[in-house]
Amino acid sequence: MSEYAATPREHLARQLAEAVAEALRADLASQARALLVVSGGSTPIAFFAALASQELAWDRVDITLADERWVSEEADDSNARLVREHLLVGKAQQARFVPLTTDHATPEQGVERVTERLLQLTWPASVVILGMGGDGHTASLFPDSRELDLALATDAPVVAVRTPSQPQARITLSAERLHHALRHVLHITGDDKRTVLGRAMSGDDVRELPIRAFLSCPLAIYWAP
């Protein structure tokens, strides 16, 4: 027997991977393809690895991102690179990944092409997995973003985002598109994030803490210290 004991975050990642895989299997039992929307950052790395090891009809799974920095897919801070290195491995290489960037110079120029890609996917998504920053943002819905009102209200699938607190331009799924899913998950770690979530639950100003836009729908919260 191995003496290795999983950390709380690793245990959480495995639990989430098993739940997501089960959801995808359930949907694939009644439809040709299923869509998974994931978030970037450091938190989901262990989850990606755990999910990639799940037995699944990966060749019938589409994966896209909740948001992305407008950088090359080879850039260190590219969410697409994160997904390719940690999720699209082993059997999960058979999944179809749909990135949110193009070769256009700006996200504003690339929005139309990204929209075309996204509209070809199987909506509603089986699962949307959200993260959350210390400022209460989720996807690229930042409190200080000039496009926040648009991203919260538009019917368009994606929005180009410029945010003073962030060095790069971004593209994000709109709140409406993120809501267009059968299941929503919030995956966060650390006491600071739990504190922010508590604040979000005690108020209703979405502009202050954009994660509030998703607290009114059924939301499975996966948290570990």
Image (cartoon, grey):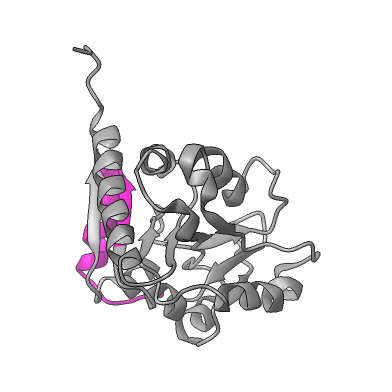
| Of residues 49 and 167, the one drawn nearer to the viewer in this rendering | 49
Q: Is residue 223 left or right of residue 160?
A: left
Q: Is residue 108 visible?
A: yes
184 or 162: which is nearer to us? Answer: 184
In which quadrant will I find the C terminus?
top left
- Given residues 37 and 190, the one toward you in this image is 37
Residue at 44%, 65% (x, y): give it. 35
Residue 190 position by quadrant: top left
As drawn, is 213 to the left or to the right of 220?
A: right
Does the magenta-highlighted stretch encompass residue 192?
Answer: yes
Instruction: In the rendered view, tell whether residue 47 sits above or below residue 118.
Output: above
* Image height of 214 relative to 44, above or below: below
| Image coordinates for residue 216, horizontal then vertical, percent | 24, 76
Residue 136, percent across and down? Answer: 38, 61
The residue drawn where x is 45% and y is 52% is 58
Q: Position of residue 203 (x, y in %)?
A: 24, 72
Quadrant of the image occupied by residue 67: bottom right
User: Quadrant where the N terminus lies?
Assistant: top left
Vertically, is 49 above or below 171?
A: above
Is residue 10 shown above or below 99?
Answer: above
Identify which residue is drawn at 27% across, 76% down: 204
Which stretch did the figure color magenta?
Answer: 185-207
